[in-house]
Amino acid sequence: MAEQTAPMQTWYGIDIGGTKIELVACDAALTVHHRQRVATPTHDYAAFVAAVGQLVDDADAALGTRAVAVGLGLPGVRDRDSGRQLSANVPALSGHTVGRDLEARLQCPLALGNDLQCFALSEAHDGAAAGYPSMFGVILGTGAGGGYCLEGRLVAGNNGIAGEWGHWSLPATLQLRHDLPLLDCGCGLRGCLERYVSGSGLAMIHERQGGQACDATAVVEQAHAGDPIALQALAIHRDLLGYSFASLILALDPHVIVLGGGLSKLEQLYRDLPAAIEPYLFNGVRVPPILPPAFGDAGGARGAALLARQHHPAS
């Protein structure tokens, strides 16, 4: 009589973004066996819950089995007491108990994480930071944030916000040096680094210098063409990043920093950032390697699957 093969055990990782929701189904070795993306219903919460539920149903049908657990990389922050989400990129989530509602819909164990932290966790496992005792994953895109991993495990912190360096404050010295305005932030604070070092921050700096580029990509293209205003905007942006990364190093001392997000595609960052960081460090402190991501924009969903596997191992 032929021996029956046990069904493959999988963990689903779901990355919630401002434009897309991506699900990947991974086995214990993090090999992806199924992948699907849909548009994010950013302003309709019922449609959002339905979209996530349908992704999971589709994966179950494609694989012929249910997941051991589902990991969610959610944008924004979650109140630990009420479970309610606050999200600027996906407003439909704000004020809702996303974890409880999805657990009721999916009838499956969940592991909740921040989308930025899931990116870091993915890069810490067989990614750019593999083999390093500690790492910090920096996201530079529409916003600015990240995640911190020690020995391959995510450090979320007491409030689950470890890695939210984008909401550290721009110092007055840099504000005055570069004649920058004091900007309000969607988090409710003022002068957050995210408003200055993100892609939209670079475009704002360019406009302050007299440029008219509509976004960060246009600023970079103009700088490559030799435009002096765009080159000056990039120099200011690089100085702000240098301060920001130096603060990360002084606070957490990671063995490696991995960049993600749209600005991580700028090759000059890997060449120029170390020199921009050094002036903000005291003697004897070394700048760690700064590396591009191994998994690109797929890292968030993979990290969410890994988070699910760590919290809910195979039975």
Image (cartoon, rainbow, N blue to C red):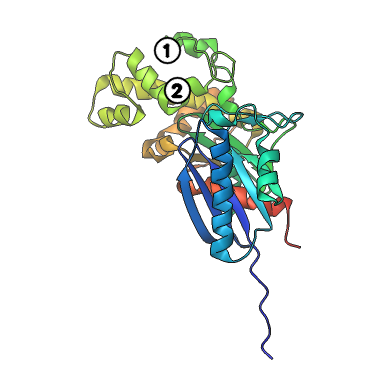
Displayed quadrant of residue 200: top left
Q: Amino acid at mark 2?
A: Asp
Residue 54: image location, x then y, percent = 55, 50
Displayed quadrant of residue 126: bottom right
Q: Could you say which is closer to the camera, residue 178 or residue 139? A: 139
| Secondary structure found at label 2 | helix
Q: Which residue is mark 2?
A: 239
Q: Identify whether 152 is placed above or below 177.
A: below
Of the residues under marks 2 and 1, which one precedes in the sequence? 1
- 97 left or right of 207 in image: right
Q: Could you say which is closer to the camera, residue 143 or residue 208? A: 143
Q: CA distance from mark 2 to mark 1?
A: 10 Å
Residue 268: image location, x then y, percent = 37, 36
Residue 230: image location, x then y, percent = 30, 23
Picture residue at 38% right of the left edge, 18% below the top: 205
Give the number of the disc on residue 178. 1
Q: How many marks overall?
A: 2
Residue 134: image location, x then y, percent = 64, 44
Q: Are marks 2 and 1 in contact (CB under 8 Å)?
A: yes
Q: Could you say which is closer to the camera, residue 182 or residue 172? A: 182
For the C terminus, the image quarter is: bottom right
Label 1 environment density (alpha carbons within 10 Å; few <14, some 14–19, many ≥20)? some
Picture residue at 32% right of the left edge, 14% below the top: 209
Picture residue at 66% right of the left edge, 88% below the top: 2
Asked whether residue 255 appears in the rendered view, the answer is no
Q: Identify whether 98 is placed above or below 312.
A: above
Picture residue at 69% right of the left edge, 58% below the top: 68
